[in-house]
Image (cartoon, rainbow, N blue to C red):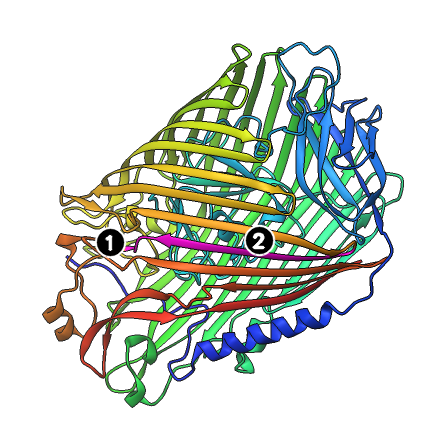
Amino acid sequence: MNTRSTLLPISYIKVANHINPNIYYMKTLALGFILLAISSISTYGQGINQTVKGRVVDSETQQPIAGANISVQGTQLGVSSGSDGFFKIVGVPVGRYDINISFIGYEASTIPNITVTSAKEVVLSVAMKQSFQQMEQVVVRANGRKDRTVNTMANISARTFSVEETRRYAGGLDDPARMASAFAGVTVGNIQDNAISIRGNTPKSVLWRVEGVEIPNPNHFAGGNVAGGGFVSLFSSQMLSNSDFFTGAFPAEYANAMAGVFDIKLRTGNSEKYENTVQVGVMGIDLASEGPLSKGKGSSYLFNYRYSTAGLLSKLKIIPTDQVPVYQDLSFKVNIPTKTYGTFSIWGIGGVDHLSEPVDDDSTKWETSWDRLKFSWDIYTGAAGLSHKITLGKTYISTTVALSGTSNELIQDRYDDYMQMRPNAAIKSKTGTFTASTTINSKISQRHTLRAGLTLKQLFYNLDISNTIHEDPTSYQNMILQDGASQAYECFWQSKYQLSNVLNLQVGVNTMLLALNNSYSVDPRISLKYQLAENHSLTLGMGKHSQIEELRFYFIRKQVNGENQFPNKNLKLAQAHHIILGYDWNISKDLRLKLETYYQQLYRVPGIADSSYSLINFSQDWAFYEKLVNNTKGRNFGVDVTFERFLSKGYYYLATASIFSSKYKAGDNTWHNTRFNKGYSVNLLAGKEVSLSKNRTLGANARVNFLGGERKSPILEAESIKNKRAILDESKAFSEQYPSTYYLDVTLTYRTNHKKYTGTWALQVKNILGSPIYSGPAYNFKTKQVEEQKVTLVLPVISYRIDF
């Protein structure tokens, strides 16, 4: 039973057959090196200094810490925080430093790899964790944990990432998702897309949060190739603060995800000085600004606007594609602290995308079905909120109201066999969510911290989806037509107990209810951390996790005896159990080894009765039109290894390896490989910074990724040729595999500091060796055979950034 419909012909940079992409990227590389060479001809400036400032608070209560010692490692510079927790260190020479913070009764911490430039002051947020060992004097330790997460409730399968890493990691393209693909347990698919699979799970099982609120897929051209992915993130690196990434058994406050979580934090603008950034490059033009709203009041603004240059470059045929991608985005945050009523912030992100492709009227040139299609696609995505945070003694309360949503409109037409243009798809989807959320964090005692929260969601939807089945023009019909609203509710509590100086326990529960069909979940979570020795620890995490499907799946309608029926409306929540055992060894202050082994048991995942089809393998299918039942089980298990040297003395390296298995059993009652069961992934990253002078720095970064191929189902050759489309043997679902592959990414940066501005050239190249990309089988009208589609794409990105 083959129920799959043809995917949308969206390939963000689809290389034309008559153009050699190698010529394009070689020219771009040559131009980049010429620009870098020209830029290196600059005068040696005098010594340039900058200010490093920030605020020190208790990580649990957010109360300011007065008298904390803050020092710049490698210098004699240092100060103590004031009664309000604020500090300011002036006269710091430009360069890269670790910032050490210590205070009696608290664990010393280190903020690593802070880049001090001439253009912008460095503004830090320091959260210190109370120590459970008596301290008789202040001790400055340079080996504070450099990998500690922002979320203090995270014990296992979590790591923080910084703006610096999204820019520095080769192949990251300033994108959190692409950057995270270098972490253990994470694999990528098509390099044109930033969708990631975590521990063998579908990318749509990843949750995105901003400022504590769930948001829709925050990517340009979201879901074009893979649900859960897109071309590039809406987030500009100018907006990000240190954020967290989870790959399993996440804390109880995270709901509606079964694979992983991006918990994104937006930084606060400088409240004392106006600062600006302009960046021009192949990916787009960025304009950013920040500064005080009213000097002396502590309030600030920060915004970033980006417009893609890809549309212009494609029109000029600099990018070899017939598609015309255009996108733009705007992000902002306004921060208003008060003396009595806490801190208010207004924030938002939004993106506008347009992609279109004309049809070739000459049928003699057609090779695949995509060549007889034309389409136009418009997407509007956004989220905006009002947040309030207040500290009352040892308790702080965070409250947010937010509105988010996505508008998707894709119109697709196709030539039939008689050269008549016929409608093939009309996707009109508008979904939105009004969210009201509050979280209370209270330090009950020195050893016990309690966190609890409640989230109310009002869901809005206006869905009008029409499509053909297998591109048969006579089958064109409306599949979903629904307009209305529903609700979803989430609540959680979580406690952190320091049972002893070496044993930490975290326990909690998350509950979720979808009022649309009254399906609900009760998900307990627990984790333990045992400090074997000063630099050795064991962690154990277990948790149950649940997820709501896309609303369109619930509203698929069928005509039965002339009446509309909705066979999927009562789908239950898909669920999974995670069990993780980890070992962490801080070999030295800059070197660590981390091992994690895990087992995940998935169940109640929707699939088709008596078929191997299951949403556990879902990639993308806008024309899906089948009845679903909660009939799928799955199991993922594997080992993740991380060996990392943090950036110090001008260089860093990161080696990650994952060996895993991902299987499922759906309606046919047979165990199969999942689509995402690649088997293994190995990442090797390294980078070096060289100071050419006091004010000039050259950086080189490289990453190589080895990974198994994505799974595929065998092709039924005779049946496919007869029907002139690829028909798969679903009885042997995902029994075959694409070849293993490797990607090599390179990033070069050149930064110069001047008295009033900093200039940075960057050249980033993805897939520099031109490894092929496989996109699935298609019938070839010329050869009259079903052939695997593959293309070689090298993506060079040059940019120049000026901070002033």
**In the foreground, 289 or 683:** 683
Residue identified by numbered label 1: 626
Residue 163 percent coordinates (x, y): 62, 47
Counting labels gives 2
Please name whichever residue, 106 or 564, is drawn nearer the observer in this view of the structure.
Answer: 106
Quadrant (top left/top right/bottom left/bottom right) for the C terminus: bottom right
Is residue 284 at least partly visible in the picture?
no
Q: Residue at x 21, y 53 (%)?
A: 734
Residue 380 is a magenta residue: no
Magenta span: 695-710
Residue type at mark 1 is: Glu
What kind of residue is marked 2? Gly
Residue 209 screen position, x and y as percent = 54, 42
Nearer the observer: mark 1 or 2; the answer is 2
Residue 453 horizontal side relative to residue 367, left or right: right
- Disc 1 element: loop
Q: Quadrant of residue 233?
A: bottom right
Q: x, y (%) of residue 627?
A: 23, 50
Locate the N terminus by quadrant: bottom left
Left or right position of 252 against 547: right
Q: Give the CA distance from mark 1 to mark 2.
A: 30 Å
- Residue pictured at 53% horizontal, 18% vertical: 496
Provide residue 49's location: percent of width, then percent of height. 84, 48
Please give the residue where the numbered disc 2 appears in the rendered image: 382
Label 2: few (<14), some (14–19) or many (≥20) C-alpha neighbours in 10 Å? many
